[in-house]
Amino acid sequence: MAIIEIPYSTKSLKVNVEDKNLKGILVSKANSYKADCSQNDIVNRSLDNCIGSKSLEELVKDKHNMVIITSDHTRPVPSKITMPILLERVRKVNPSINIKILIATGFHRPTTKEEMINKFGQNIVDNEEIINHVSTDEDSLVSVGILPSGGELFLNKLAMETELLIAEGFIEPHFFAGFSGGRKSILPGIASAKTIMANHCSEFINSNHARTGIIKDNPIHKDMLYAAEKSNLAFILNVVIDENKNIINAFAGDSKLAHEEGCKFVMDLSSVKSIEADIVVSSNGGYPLDQNLYQAVKGMTAAEATCKKCGVIIMIAACNDGHGGQSFYDTVANSKGPEELLERILKVPRNETIPDQWEIQILARILSNYTVIVVTDVCDPNMITSMHMKHAYTFDEALSQAYNIKGKDADVVVIPNGVGVVVEK
């Protein structure tokens, strides 16, 4: 019997699958990748060897102010390591520069002070000016152009008015943008709700190019690149992390070129061959990405890519923060079913996208083809079942439910970290 460790919240679960059922385990090579130096050294080395750009030190010379964009509480960017390095390098050559740290919340809620301390450490929270981007605050936004898709591009004023704009982040597979990092710091990171919804329209989400690991001909990526260019994003520091959230590589420099190099590295590590199965087990890689059902949809897409139609997806995600979005919950829970919901969303025009429609659309697509069982012991089961999914307190309970649906001899594939792999047919 195979015993497989799967991230769950801030810990992990050990799950058992009989050898006769287990058909494969899909794991990113990032889990076994061994860096040749410390995390700090990896970051500093990338900053010493910029890709397609002047060095950070050259860029900050003679500047009076700058903005550093960083990810929010839903992303495991190791800012306790990266941010101090960035601040030290900047102030070494320009001690008097005014620095603002702008949290790229995108369409999410603001990051709390407690979450900031957890992300940056007490020292940075106490001594730096940190601002949450609020996508619905029109007074904090400015129009800067029209996206290739036709939507109006509104971005945060602080970012647009600063002399130097840079961003830190991390690169991992993303379920409709292809990869995270780079241009995503701008769109959706510091864009308006209106702009985000135009970019995340049903037409684009439905595109076969808007999938995990794909940026070529991806209409969502194309809009994001335009937004990064219009924002004058001058420099990025993007890291790659392993399953323990430790930095294994870093890419710094031009926002497009450095990001592309990082994506190539991640693709090489995370690409796995699909193994079709009746039952597929997935996770969101633990905290912070498994805080809610909204984020858990990402891990489900990895299972979707390798599960037989009408199969069962077992999603292990704590969802301690609940559904993750009221409109997300209300729309799914109040629908007659996923098929009706998906059909309705696909008819929504590009400029009439509603909040969280993209996540609703992808979940509806999955639920139209698979039975989803969510494993959590810290989330209201009624909330899960009202959203047309099944609930289990334990993995064994979920597996038993799955066998009742697909039979005791059903094939099982396990993806310990669904957001860390690109499943290729």
Image (cartoon, rainbow, N blue to C red):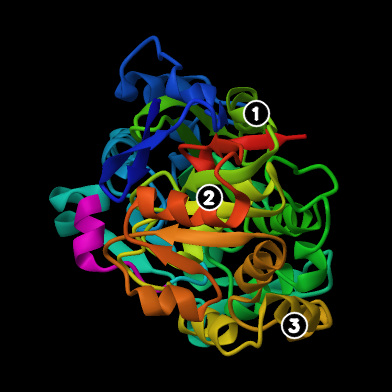
Could you say which is closer to the camera, residue 15 or residue 236?
Answer: 15
Residue 316 visible: no
Where's the N terminus, which quadrant?
top left
The magenta stretch spans which residues? Answer: 109-118
Residue type for callout 3:
Glu
Could you say which is closer to the camera, residue 239 or residue 166?
Answer: 239
Query: Residue 327 lies in magenta, yes or no?
Result: no
Residue density around tag 3, few if under 14, some if 14–19, many if 20 or more, within 10 Å: few
Task: Of the two numbered discs 3 and 1 on the same chain, state the one appearing first in sequence.
Answer: 1
Q: Which residue is mark 2?
A: 403
Task: Of the two numbered discs 2 and 1 on the same chain, state the one appearing first in sequence.
Answer: 1
Residue 359 visible: yes
Task: Of the two numbered discs 3 and 2 on the same chain, state the one appearing first in sequence.
Answer: 3
Is residue 183 rendered to the left or right of residue 236? right
Write the residue at 37% across / 69% down.
132
By secondary structure, the bulk of the magenta-drawn segment is best described as helix
Instruction: Tell me if label 2 and label 1 are in contact, CB under 8 Å.
Output: no
Image vertical order of residue 214 relative to residue 3, above or below:
below
Instruction: Tell me if label 3 and label 1 are in contact, CB under 8 Å.
Output: no
Disc 2 element:
helix
Query: Residue 112 lies in magenta, yes or no?
Result: yes
Q: Which residue is mark 1?
A: 271
Residue type for callout 2:
Tyr
Q: Which mark is residue 340?
A: 3
Q: Which mark is residue 301?
A: none
